[in-house]
Image: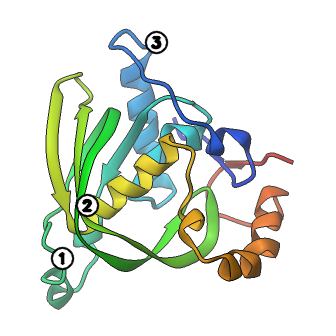
Amino acid sequence: MILPIVAYGADILRKVSGAITPDYPNLAKLLDDMWETMYASNGVGLAAPQINKDIRLFVVDSAQVFENLEEDEKETYSDAPGIKEAFINAQIISFAGEEWPYNEGCLSIPKVREDVYRPAEVTVEYMDANFNQHRKTFNGITARVIQHEYDHIEGKLFIDYLKPLKRKLLKGKLDDIAKGKIRVDYKMTFAK
């Protein structure tokens, strides 16, 4: 089932999410719905707060990025062919490598894209969809998508990384999104 994406301005997007246990009600269905919602919205990641659930859960499919790159662009990133993975109760253990810019967007903040600097590498401890424990290091585009989605379960948004002047320039657009004054081709819910 395709779920509505929570728009910028909703309190849940600023809340630190709580951990879940393997007996979380209807987890398999929730994960299926999250994948379906993400794909229907043309996203490469989706966090539970974006579908109005304050739990430490997000899904990432960075393989889509590589499928859509030109052949010569694929060598730009070290993490080809990408991953498709659910992250439950994720905790970032460490960052490494130089920060690099990438033009990020967010399903909760439609039609706003800005360059964000993030570390090249991230090590994460998490459980997969079957609650198997993992500790992995990711780099390239995959590391970036994971950091972006992880921020969602920590109550952060990519616009928080922008300089104050840039945020000020975006204020009108952000206010319009919060009020629902935007057209998108996927379901959304608005705070105001």
Instruction: Check residue 36 in the rendering and tell me which mark sits there, or answer none.
Output: none
Camera-side mark, 1 or 3: 1
Q: Amino acid at mark 3?
A: Pro
Q: Are marks 2 and 3 in contact (CB under 8 Å)?
A: no
| Residue ranking furthest to the top | 23
User: Which residue is drawn at the image coordinates 61% and 56% (left, top)?
Assistant: 108
**Residue 78 drawn above or below residue 178:** below
Residue 77 seen in render: yes
Q: Depth check: 186 or 136 in front? A: 136
Pointer 1 or 3: first along the chain? 3
**SS label for mark 2:** helix
Disc 1 versus disc 3: distance between alpha carbons? 38 Å
Q: Position of residue 178 (x, y in %)?
A: 79, 57
Q: Amino acid at mark 1?
A: Tyr
Residue 185 seen in render: no
Q: Which residue is mark 3?
A: 25
**Residue 134 drawn above or below residue 184:** above
Q: Amino acid at mark 2?
A: Thr
Q: Depth check: 56 or 123 in front? A: 123
- In terms of image quadrants, where is residue 138? bottom left
Horizontal arrangement in the rendering, residue 62 relative to residue 133 (left or right):
right
**Residue 77 drawn above or below residue 21:** below
Pointer 2 or 3: first along the chain? 3
Q: How is the image coloured?
A: rainbow
User: Which residue is drawn at the image coordinates 20% and 86% (left, top)?
Assistant: 73
Disc 2 versus disc 1: distance between alpha carbons? 9 Å
Q: Which residue is mark 2?
A: 142
Structural crowding at the residue carrying mark 1, measured as other residues with C-alpha within 10 Å and reported as few (<14), some (14–19) or many (≥20): some
Structural crowding at the residue carrying mark 2, measured as other residues with C-alpha within 10 Å and reported as few (<14), some (14–19) or many (≥20): many
- In terms of image quadrants, where is residue 49? top right
**SS label for mark 3:** loop
User: Which residue is drawn at the image coordinates 12% and 83% (left, top)?
Assistant: 75
